[in-house]
Amino acid sequence: MCAKLGAGFVRKSGGVLPQRQQILEPIDVSPYGVLAGVDEVGIGPLAGAVVACAVILDPTVPINDLRDSKRLSEKARERLAEIICRQSLSWSLGSASVAEVDRHNVLVASHLAMQRAVAGLSVTPDTVLVDGNKTPDFGLPARAVVKGDQRVAAISAASIVAKVTRDRQLVELAARFPGYGFERHKGYPTKHHLQALAALGPCEAHRRSFAPVQRAASPGTEL
């Protein structure tokens, strides 16, 4: 959920946020009151749920090394996820199932997951900042922040917890559906995954609305 950053500003619903407020270093978040950062993981994979996380960090207890989850090693993500869950004022996970991805579409499903994550927070935020350029309706003031997982600490924290959670889910799916290599590629359309799809056909964890899965379910077509 990223888009190109304009000069000095990022897009949001209803206006723009100054880029100076999007640096990952400690910033003055007083304009937003109690701030929840939200991010999702699982837009691109061919299998598994979409997972979102909402995090309200404790401004009195800063967490070092927060950044986009994709820029961290698995070990670092695991370590930081534990710290985030222990030290944040509130955090919550939300997900949208494979069936929901297929019934609606993956964008709608990602918004459902984010709404569920925010709804599950034990503390009601004054403002929700979401990674990307679109935000679902939370019933709260919300802003979409382009490349927010690199610029807002709470969004970085959410991306880390969401990524760790979803990766663990895919490891569990690998045990349920052996042969696909979910524990390695986490459902993304790697060469190994596509080869496994061709050989084994789709399993229950696959998103039937995605073209590579549809082709694998139809004998005589090429992936």
Image: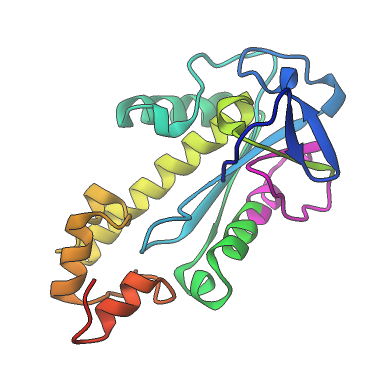
Residue 218 image position (x, y, % from top left): 26, 86
31 is higher (above) or lower (below) than 192: above
Residue found 80% across the figure and 45% down from its top: 13
Q: Is residue 47 left or right of residue 106?
A: left
Residue found 32% across the figure and 32% down from its top: 74
Q: Quadrant of the C terminus?
A: bottom left
Per the rendered image, the range of residues in magenta is 115-140
Residue found 32% across the figure and 73% down from its top: 213
By secondary structure, the bulk of the magenta-drawn segment is best described as loop
Q: Is residue 144 left or right of residue 207?
A: right
- For this orientation, the residue located farthest to the front is 7
Residue 149 image position (x, y, % from top left): 56, 32
Image quadrant in which you'd find residue 76: top left
Total marks drawn? Answer: 0
Residue found 29% across the figure and 60% down from its top: 173
- Asked which colour scheme the image uses, the reply is rainbow
Image quadrant in which you'd find residue 130: top right
Is there any visible trace of residue 126 in the rendered image?
no
Is there any visible trace of residue 184 in the rendered image?
yes
Residue 82 image position (x, y, % from top left): 45, 29
Which residue is more in the foreground, 22 or 36?
22
Image quadrant in which you'd find residue 122: top right
Q: Tell whether position 139 is magenta.
A: yes
Q: Is residue 67 left or right of residue 8?
A: left
Residue 190 image position (x, y, % from top left): 25, 54
